[in-house]
């Protein structure tokens, strides 16, 4: 059913008034169908958010019928528009839309929220045309910014990104990070639709129906803002047409709506958020809405297109560093990312205004067309990376490890979205020194290990870092690389391989009596401790556990078993959730190893000081490790003697 790109569909003959009335009636009928289907599926499920779906039905009916460009027979057409329900709890409305275009059947619609149904309570990308997971409010628009960046600057295609916002999520700071970045990058391909229905989960939102206040805020961020009646099809259509007229300015449509619109039991009634109607209530509501319909819409298909071939790149030439020279792993990250960008045209990078510290600036200088500055907006940085991942780029995002905690919900949701992105956290641990604890990433290993399907890497030298950066590019899921501020000695040759899930034994002998397991900065302290112990006649094994998740369970178990179960784990991280817990988990596997494990980690709040002072104060320096090894071996010997007959 073809239609005009920037206006309501008209008939081949008749007056303009007749065409207008016909289009308006078609919009209203489709909106009522969307409402009915939202009620049917949520009532069948016995849960959901029907009232939040009913308020936006007119907005989505006009979009679906007259403005959305979807080539349903070619989902991979790069010119297809993108629709994101930032208010993901309105999933019944989204699924009703997919049924209206024939993407899902009525039977599938009624499987909503059932076990193993792809129609989950909040959208996830297990369905065609659902590209990201939403439901944690405040994330859809930031992800939309990432998709729009790809369309405008990387793919250079004319798709639009339509984002349905709820008024409650307008309190989230991440929404305004997205507003700021959409303005900065002149993303006129972003159209945000605010379903201003006044009621949140527990009552009225802060601004209620004050559309002028929302519009003023948007304009202050450099957006165009249009205030409309969100239940008037003509006004909605006019706003959409106006929103599309400025290619370099994003638009916010502030639509005054009524929660539960069309059902007297629900209309503008508090206390119905997240509650489904029972069967009797649903039957009455459907009757009030004029009964069930079975309208099938064929959205306008955009011009056919194919993903532009990415230019051929040069062979990968990773940087190499001389053994025993001192190079910071953060420096090697930037050098390797630059080299990877030269070798692969799908590599893109984002950073949170610290690229001269993370060294992502090396990529930005070499490949400015594939670098996006996210400023001090860590949530937007991760969301942009997710959006770029949707468009099949391979994004690398970097900032201080400590500041990634602000974006943790976005990382968690990125895993729900099945996104593939690479994250680098620099300035980790007390070893950063004088900047003090506000800048020290001490939670990051625990945080990233807990993300579903994640990979967590912690290199100790520059050549190892370069190899791991290259490996990250092809690793699925959320991949985290922890880098160090301080320069550290280069331990490995540039040709050494570091498979994900592996480890390296740096020191070993047949008569080793204790295994020291370390990663990153503490590998160097462990090697110093080994030399000190060796001089005093105590032989120790040193394991570089650079892959913290997945950890080399086989290698670590073998090392600990070879040293009679004596092990020391040393990490520049809080004691909870990091390398120590990873080691304990692998030792307590299907065939547990009886082991005596000493865990050296940061246990007191650090302060400013030199790296050496802070490592010593935390008990992570070479002398502390050596002392712990002597005590452990001595205690083990006494225990063995006491148990002898």
Image (cartoon, rainbow, N blue to C red):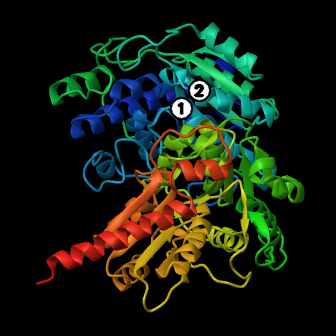
Q: Is residue 309 above or below residue 158?
A: below
Point out residue 626 in the picture as x, y percentages from the top left corner: 49, 67
Pick the quarter of the image with the C terminus.
bottom left
Q: Observer-nearest residue: 143 or 373?
A: 373
Residue at x 64% of width, y 71% of height: 468
Q: Secondary structure at mark 2?
A: helix
Q: Which residue is mark 1?
A: 138
Instruction: Check the image and name the residue furthest to the front.
Output: 536
Point out residue 179 in the picture as x, y percentages from the top left corner: 69, 28
Left or right of 354 in this view: 546: left
Tag shown at residue 173: 2
Q: Is residue 293 above or below residue 551?
A: above
Q: Do residues under tags 2 and 1 come within 8 Å of each other at their CB atoms?
A: yes
Q: Observer-nearest residue: 180 or 403?
A: 403
Q: Quadrant of residue 527?
A: bottom right
How crowded pointer 1 is (Cα within 10 Å; few <14, some 14-19, many 20+) is rated as: many
Q: Quadrant of residue 551?
A: bottom left
Point out residue 41 in the picture as x, y percentages from the top left corner: 29, 39
Q: Observer-nearest residue: 561 or 133?
A: 561
Instruction: Check the image and name the residue furthest to the left.
Output: 645
Point out residue 65 in the picture as x, y percentages from the top left corner: 56, 37
Disc nearer the start of the sequence (2/1): 1
Q: Secondary structure at mark 1?
A: loop
Residue at x 86% of width, y 53% of height: 368
Left or right of 231 in this view: 288: left
Q: Quadrant of residue 458?
A: bottom right
């Amino acid at each position: 059913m073809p239609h005009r790109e920037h206006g309501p569909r008209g008939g081949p003959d008749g007056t303009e008034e007749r065409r207008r009335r016909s289009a308006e009636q078609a919009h209203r009928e489709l909106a009522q169908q969307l409402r009915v289907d939202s009620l049917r599926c949520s009532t069948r499920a016995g849960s959901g958010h029907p009232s939040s779906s009913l308020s936006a039905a007119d907005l989505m009916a006009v979009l679906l019928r007259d403005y959305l460009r979807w080539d349903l027979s070619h989902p991979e057409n790069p010119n297809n528009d993108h629709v994101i329900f930032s208010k993901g709890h309105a999933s019944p409305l989204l699924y009703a839309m997919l049924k209206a275009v024939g993407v899902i059947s009525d039977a599938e619609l009624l499987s909503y929220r059932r076990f193993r149904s792809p129609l989950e309570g909040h959208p996830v990308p297990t369905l065609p045309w659902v590209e990201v997971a939403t439901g944690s409010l405040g994330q859809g628009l930031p992800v939309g910014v990432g998709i729009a960046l790809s369309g405008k600057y990387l793919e250079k295609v004319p798709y639009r990104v339509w984002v349905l916002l709820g008024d409650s999520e307008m309190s989230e700071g991440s929404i305004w990070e997205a507003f700021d970045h959409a303005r900065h990058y002149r993303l006129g391909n972003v159209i945000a639709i605010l379903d201003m229905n006044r009621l949140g989960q527990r009552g009225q939102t802060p601004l209620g129906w004050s559309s002028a206040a929302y519009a003023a805020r948007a304009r202050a961020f450099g957006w165009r803002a249009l205030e409309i009646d969100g239940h008037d099809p003509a006004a909605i259509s006019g706003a959409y047409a106006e929103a599309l007229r400025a290619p370099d300015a994003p638009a916010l449509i502030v639509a005054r709506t009524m929660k539960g619109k069309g059902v007297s039991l629900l209309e503008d009634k508090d206390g119905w958020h997240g509650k489904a109607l029972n069967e009797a209530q649903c039957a009455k509501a459907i009757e009030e809405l004029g009964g069930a319909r079975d309208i099938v819409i064929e959205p306008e298909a955009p011009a056919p297109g194919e993903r532009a071939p990415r230019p051929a790149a040069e062979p990968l030439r990773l940087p190499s560093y001389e053994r025993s020279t001192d190079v910071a792993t953060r420096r090697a990250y930037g050098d390797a990312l630059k080299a990877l960008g030269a070798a692969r045209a799908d590599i893109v990078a984002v950073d949170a205004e610290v690229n001269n510290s993370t060294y992502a600036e090396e990529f930005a200088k070499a490949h400015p067309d594939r670098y996006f500055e996210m400023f001090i907006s860590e949530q937007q940085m991760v969301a942009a990376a997710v959006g770029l991942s949707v468009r099949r780029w391979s994004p690398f995002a970097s900032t201080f490890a400590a500041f990634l905690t602000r974006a943790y919900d976005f990382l968690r949701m990125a895993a729900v979205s099945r996104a593939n992105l690479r994250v680098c956290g620099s300035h980790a641990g007390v070893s950063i020194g004088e900047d003090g604890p506000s800048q020290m990433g001490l939670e990051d290993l625990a945080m990233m290990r807990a993300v579903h399907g994640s990979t967590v890497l912690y290199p100790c030298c520059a050549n190892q870092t370069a190899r791991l950066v290259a490996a990250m590019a092809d690793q699925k899921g959320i991949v985290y690389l922890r880098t160090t501020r301080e320069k550290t000695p280069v331990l490995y040759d540039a040709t050494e391989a570091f498979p994900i899930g592996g480890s390296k034994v740096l020191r070993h002998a047949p008569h080793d009596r204790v295994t020291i397991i370390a990663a990153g900065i503490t590998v160097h302290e462990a090697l110093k401790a080994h030399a000190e112990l060796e001089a005093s006649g105590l032989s120790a094994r040193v394991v570089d556990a650079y892959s913290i998740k997945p950890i080399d369970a086989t290698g670590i178990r073998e090392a600990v078993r070879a040293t009679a179960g004596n092990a020391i784990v040393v990490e520049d991280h809080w004691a909870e959730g990091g390398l120590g817990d990873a080691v304990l988990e692998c030792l307590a596997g299907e065939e547990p190893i009886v082991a005596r494990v000493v865990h050296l980690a940061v246990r007191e709040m650090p302060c400013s000081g030199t790296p050496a002072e802070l490592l010593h104060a935390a008990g992570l320096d070479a002398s502390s490790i050596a002392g712990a090894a002597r005590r452990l071996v001595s205690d083990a010997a006494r225990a063995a003697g006491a148990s002898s007959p």
